[in-house]
Every structure is written in structure tokens, then in C-alpha cells.
Image (cartoon, rainbow, N blue to C red):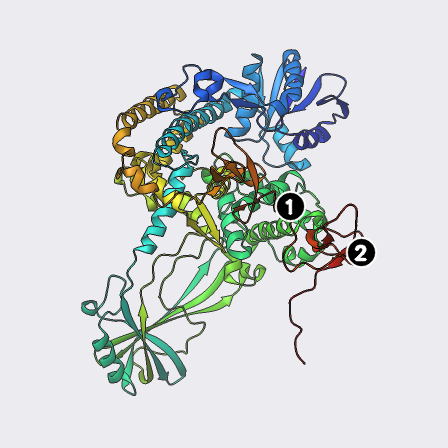
Amino acid sequence: MELYLCEKPSQANDLAAVLGVRQRGEGFLHDGNNRTITWAYGHLLEMFMPDDYDERFKSWSLETLPIAPDSWKSKVRKTGFKQFKVIEGLLKKASTVYIATDYDREGEAIARSLMDRTRYSGPVKRVCLTALDESSIRKALANIRDGHDTMPLYYAAMARQRADWLIGMNVSRLYTVLTRDVGFNQTLHVGRVITPTVALVCQRDREIANFKPSPFWTLTVGVSVQNGQFTANWVAPEECSDDHGRCTNKTYAEQVAAQVKGAQAIISKAETKAGKESAPLPFDLTSLQQYASKRWGYTAQQVLDAAQALYETHKATTYPRTDCRYLPESQREDIPDILQGLILSDQSVSGLVAGADPNRKSRAFNDKKITAHHAIIPTPARTDITKMSEVEFNLYDAIRRFYIAQFYSAFEFNRTNIEVTCGNHLFAATGKTPTKQGWKVLFNSDSESSPEDDSDQNDNPKEQEKLPRVNHGEPAMIRDSLLEDKMTRPPAHFTESSLLAAMENIARFVTEEKFRQILKDTAGLGTPATRAGIIQGAVDKGYFKRQKKVLIATDKAHALITVLPPAIKSPGMTAAWEQELEKIASGNGNMTVFMNQISQWICKLVDQLKANSAALTQDGGPLSKAFEGAKPPTHDCFNCGGEMNRIRGSKGFFWGCQNPACKKTYNDNRGKPVNPATANEPPKNAPKCPECDSPMLRRKGKPKDGKKASSFWGCSNYPNCTGIKPIKSRRKKNSL
């Protein structure tokens, strides 16, 4: 029996439709002959927790650390046990297994871990799915690889899981236990990727807090020439400028402004050059997340979820979890079908498609740049855009426009550089005049055609749209001057977009020279598929708080980063590990060697910190100082009077009593515990019930009289009385 093993049911259904497998069984599909398709629900197996290995690890204590399993074990998730038994039975009957999960490390691990657990030892083939439309699936089935070729992906996934486990279980427990001794009673989550990410934001916040602004002055002049007028900016001499060319000498700037106003000048340079700008490359996941964050304010997780839906549910785009912005040369043959599919899906783009030249050579098609997956592009499938959510359609529209742009001519322009000399003073102006819009006709503005982040602040003058024609040596006159005093600005807080860019290009933020050299053109912090979850995880764990579009590190985050060893919080170390994982995935690294190194290093680190625990936790020690201001607010327990802490649970925040003899829990209302004894007391300004004259309570939901309302007054004597009243709006009507 040929068994196709998919990652999830939707993937199995898409594959079955192409293979003609239509008969349905319990947890699988089959053709009644020799072909069966089954599916997992993501990872059906999960790694053992410490107490699964040994009961003594249930208690978090220094005595049980470090924890480093000699033999790694896993267990079946409770929610997936039924499907696991189905897969186990099918694998025992299989003569050949076709892995048809997502074509990446985690997809490989989902299938291989199940095969290992059931001890399947037969032939393995790999269906390299990059999109789930019919055409893409047929292409993947026509180019099936031998399973031996993709085995390294599994080794890399296992190495990643185990390395993360060692750091998370050991260092999280260690610092959680140590900080309890200084009165901080919250779990501290430490991870291979999340902790360096938190460190990046903490470092940026410290730079902003410690930034000392300094003044500088800019001078702009209006220049008149024979063919018109333009503005130019003073080029301050080096002796009165900072490293960025900004004038720091106010007196001199004032002298220059006075000297040049109304003075004669000369055009000392006039140069115009034609320029071209190619279309932006198609998206990878990170650039799509950056683009969507800048344009619509979407979070990285929102983009990942919507892009996954476009891939799985709508079959509208290719595999989203990619780090590549290029396309293989073989994709050229799909161009006509994809462009036709775009028109069939949405007639409104027919004009844009009509302007595309499928035969145009785009830099996006480059086999040498391809990694495990190619860029995110539309599929040839006809898709129903009316079934897309607003987020999904916005992303789909961006993806298709970036793809169509590949078949448009370059944006062409003339760039003019003019220098004006007035006495000993130099002024400069730059202009950019479009001569051919090319691919830019697909976008309304430059921001719509750029996925890069725009958070960098600078005071450089912008290019002018058009400058008058001038000649070298032509006389000019400075008709006016404008001197402005300005202050240097601190670096911007991280937004989700700029943090994604920092994680991807981590070499720019690494201070260790040995890592910077290694990482310039290689690994980043995390992977495109995990970065959104890492950022959201930092928010959920109380390390980041969102303030509009920016991410701010909390006191808890700053305290933790202050006390952690450099190697744990170093982006360089973590990214270097990711590079080693990539070597394993490509077959050039050894999982066993890597894991031995990580295990030995973690155990040594934990032992050193344990030996120094007394000094760390003593009054006035590093932990005591760091966490003194990070302790969250507490409240007295309504039951026993003991201390209560605010805790994040799976369904949101709640309050829990820390007294072991009590352990009562209470609901949370805007950061405060809700006392059940007074929760249903009517407020002082509550109206009287029109039915029974009892005081009324503010209630949420739809009242029984059918009127639409988000909240209303309901009788406190409910259910004996069902009287209701609408809540009057406090907004004042506009006066006429």
C-alpha cells in the first residue's frame, strides 16, 4: 500500500482531489485499491516534560538542576491520540510512505517522528509541496524526491527542539527559583530565541532613555535662476559639523544666513543622469509582515495567519513560511497560467495584467538564490475573493501586485544634482523627475511599493520632484534664507515591522566581532515561520507591551535581561546556533555533535550559577537589585487575607492566592481582582427597575426585547424580575 502522510486534513483533501482518491475512512482517504492518504494535526507527538522523565522534577528546585536527558523521549498529545492510532495502523501496512507535509524542517519532523515512533523502516519518498492548487500539486507529484535527500531536515528539526528544551527547562527553572528568593513570584520564561529578542528591545529602550539631545542648525535658501526657482541646502564645513554633517555652531550658521541672503551666486555644478529602478522582488514572509505592518498596522501573527489561510483555504498563494524572495527559472512556464488565474479570480486586475509582458526577464527568476522555498506568489488557481477576509484580501492584493510588477518595465527617471556657490559657502539640491512610470503604475505611492521598514529617523533633505534646467557657470541669486534650530533625536522604539527586520538582519545588532562576521550574509534570529510567534509570546509572557504601533519592554523584561549571562541573551550566539541548524538541514552538520556541545554548555552554565546562588540572591545582590522595581502589584485575598498575584492563564488573566492553605482564584477586571461578594452590588447611580423598583445592574449582551445594545440596565432581582432599561449615552449632541 502506498501511504501519503499529510500535515493536516485540508492538505490531504487537496492532494486526494488530484490523485483521484475519493473513498473516506476513519481518519484517512483511500481509492479502494493501493493508495491511501492520511493526516496529522500538526505535531501529534510532544516532547517529554521533565517530570515525565522523573517524578522528582515536578518540584522546581536548584537541587534537581541541570536536567539533561540521556535518551530523548516523546509522547502522543492527548488531543491527537485517536488520529495517531489511525496513522500507526496504516504505517504498519504501508509498503511505501510518501511524505506530503509542508516542505520544511517542521513538516519533515511531523512525518518522520511518527514513522520513527511506529518503527516504520520501508521506502520513503518526498512530495515537495509549495502550493496547494491543482497545478502545483501535479507538478510536485511529477517531481517526487527520494526520502534520503530530505532526512537532514528532520535532524535539524530535532536538534532545534532539543536545544530549545535544554535552555527553556533549565534556565527558566533556575531563574524562576532564584528570583522567588528575592520576592518575585512570577515564572520567568527564558528561551533560545525569545530572550535575545527581548534583549534587543530592552537595549533600544535603554538607548532612548539615556539619550541626550544636542542642538544643530540647518540652513535652507531660495535660489533664483534664469529658468525658475528652487531650494537648496547648506553644506556645512567639517570643522563646524558633527559626524552626520549637521552644523553644531550656531553663531557661524547665523553669519552664513545673513551673508548669503540677497547675494549673488553661481551654479558650480549641474549634472543630470538617467536612472532606472527595477520592480521590488516578490515577498518572503518577513518582508510581507513588514509591508503589512507599515501599511495597515497588522501584527506579524495576523499576517502569518492570513497568509496561511491564503495558502491552505483559498489556494490563492504559494507556501508562506519562506525566507526567499526569488523564483526558480522553471517557474517561468507558469507565468501565463498565473496571470490568467488572476483575471479569472478578479476582473478588476485585467487592465494591470494586460500591461504585463510575460516574456520580460525579471531579476526575481534566479536559481542560485533559491533556498528550501521560493517567494510567495499567486497560484494559477481561480479563487473566490469574496470569501476572503479584509486582511486576507489586502495581503492577496499586495502579493499579486508584486508578482505582476515583475513583468513591467523599469521605473525610469532623471536625477539632477545642483551645487550653488555663494562666496565660500556651498549649497546643494537634488531632484528626481520621472520619465517613465513602468511598474509604479501598479501602486499609488512609494510606500505601497516598498516592503522595507521606514522607522529610521534622519534629517536628510528629501529629493525635489522637479528642478529647473540650469547650466554649469550660470549666475544665480540667493533670494532668501531660512535658519532652523533642531535637536538630535533618539533612535525610534521598535515597531513590529522594525523588530522583524532586526531579527532577520541580526548582524547589525551584534557587538561580538566574531559573530558579526559569521552572520553578515547568513542566519538571522529565529526563522520567518517562528518570528511572529516569538514576538507575540514576548507580549503574552509580560516582556513587551504594545503602545499603539511600538513595542516597549516591561520592568520584568529589563530585570531579567540585566541578570542573565551574556551568552543566553546574545543575539549573536543564538543566530550562530541557527546557522549550525541550517548546516545540519543541508547535510553539512552533525546533529549528535551539536547536541553534545549544547548539553555540556548548558549543564556547565547552570552549575556555575547554582554555585553562586547565595551571592546572587542576598540583600543588595544582583537579583535583589534588578527585580526590586519589577515586582507586580499584589492584592489581599478576599478569603484569607494572604497575598494574591495576577496570573495569565489560557483564557486570560486571573488572580490567585499564594497562601498554600487557600489557593483561591478570582476574576480579573482591568488589572484588579473581582470580589465575588460585591461583584453583583448595584452601583450608586443605578436606576430603579420599572417593574419592581429594585436597583438595576449594568449587563452586557442583547436584551430580551430584541433591541440591539452592547450593554443595558437589568434588574438585580433577575430571574424573578426581567425588567430592563437602556443605558443613555453621555455624549452631548452637537449644538446647532
Residue position for label 2? 691
Q: CA distance from mark 1 to mark 2?
A: 66 Å
Q: Looking at the image, is mark 1 or mark 2 earlier in the sequence?
A: 1
Q: Is residue 254 toward the left or the right of residue 275 in the image?
A: left
Give coordinates of residue 81: x percent, y percent.
63, 20
**Quadrant of the image for the C terminus?**
bottom right
What mark, if any, has residue 357 been given in the picture? none
Give coordinates of residue 661: x percent, y percent.
50, 28
Residue type for callout 1: Ile
Give coordinates of residue 3: x percent, y percent.
65, 19
Which of the 4 image quadrants contains residue 189? top left
Instruction: Work out whether residue 548 or residue 175 is closer to the camera in this orientation and state it.
Output: 175
Residue position for label 1? 338
Q: Is residue 425 toward the left or the right of residue 162 in the image?
A: left
**Quadrant of the image for the N terminus?**
top right
- Asked if 707 appears above or below 617 in the picture, the reply is below
- Asked if 232 appears above or below 448 in the picture, the reply is below
Give coordinates of residue 23: x percent, y percent.
77, 23
Residue type for callout 2: Glu
Residue appearing at x 48%, y 29% in the figure: 660
In this view, the residue farthest toward the bottom is 262
Residue appearing at x 65%, y 66% in the figure: 730
- Element under disc 1: helix
